[in-house]
Image: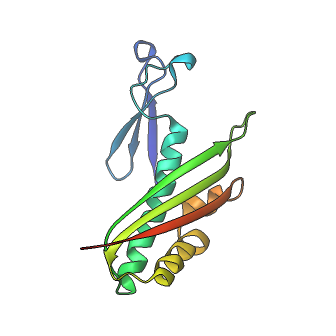
Amino acid sequence: MECTVRWMGNDAGMSFVAETGSGHAVVMDGAPEAGGRNLGPRPMELVLAGTGGCSAFDVVLILKKSRQAVTACDVSLTAERAETDPKVFTHIHFHYRVKGKQLKADAVARAIELSKDKYCSASIMIAKTAEITYDFEIIEEV
């Protein structure tokens, strides 16, 4: 895996462009009080978003493999950070909303557990500094 992060220069304040090995680009920026211009998400917001994406990906894949009729999945993450540098994540709560037809609660719980404990590299890595908690709700497809 590769990524190049490039500062956009003095005229851009604290904006950076990350170009991934898979050919995608994302703009990151700092808070205005740190010299940023709010042109993109903060780098730590992207870490949080990537963690949510990693886990949601796992949950959907595991549910599909277990022949659950999943039609939608989203996860809201709420994170707390240390007050002093390095301001690592200290707690992240995941709230999953999984939609489908006759989804089994135990299958959803198992998919989340497998993601958290075995498959999601991002959350497993972050769990070295942060307590990770989760809950979920199932929405019946009509």
**The one of 67 and 50 positioned closer to us in this rendering:** 67
Q: Is residue 61 left or right of residue 120?
A: left
Q: Position of residue 3 (x, y in %)?
A: 45, 46
**Residue 122 versus residue 40 in the image, above or below:** below
Q: Quadrant of residue 98?
A: bottom left
Residue sticking out furthest to the right:
84
Q: Residue at x 59, y 56 (%)?
A: 93
Q: Position of residue 18 (x, y in %)?
A: 42, 38
Q: Residue at x 54, y 58 (%)?
A: 94
Residue sticking out furthest to the bottom:
67
Q: Residue at x 50, y 18 (%)?
A: 32
Q: How is the image coloured?
A: rainbow
Q: Residue at x 73, y 33 (%)?
A: 85
Q: Position of residue 13 (x, y in %)?
A: 46, 16
Q: Quadrant of residue 56?
A: bottom left
Residue sticking out furthest to the left:
142
**Residue 28 versus residue 120 in the image, above or below:** above
Q: Position of residue 82 (x, y in %)?
A: 72, 40
How many marks the image carries: the answer is 0
**Residue 97 versus residue 25 in the image, above or below:** below
**The one of 89 and 103 positioned closer to us in this rendering:** 103
Q: Quadrant of the C terminus?
A: bottom left
**Residue 97 versus residue 126 in the image, above or below:** below
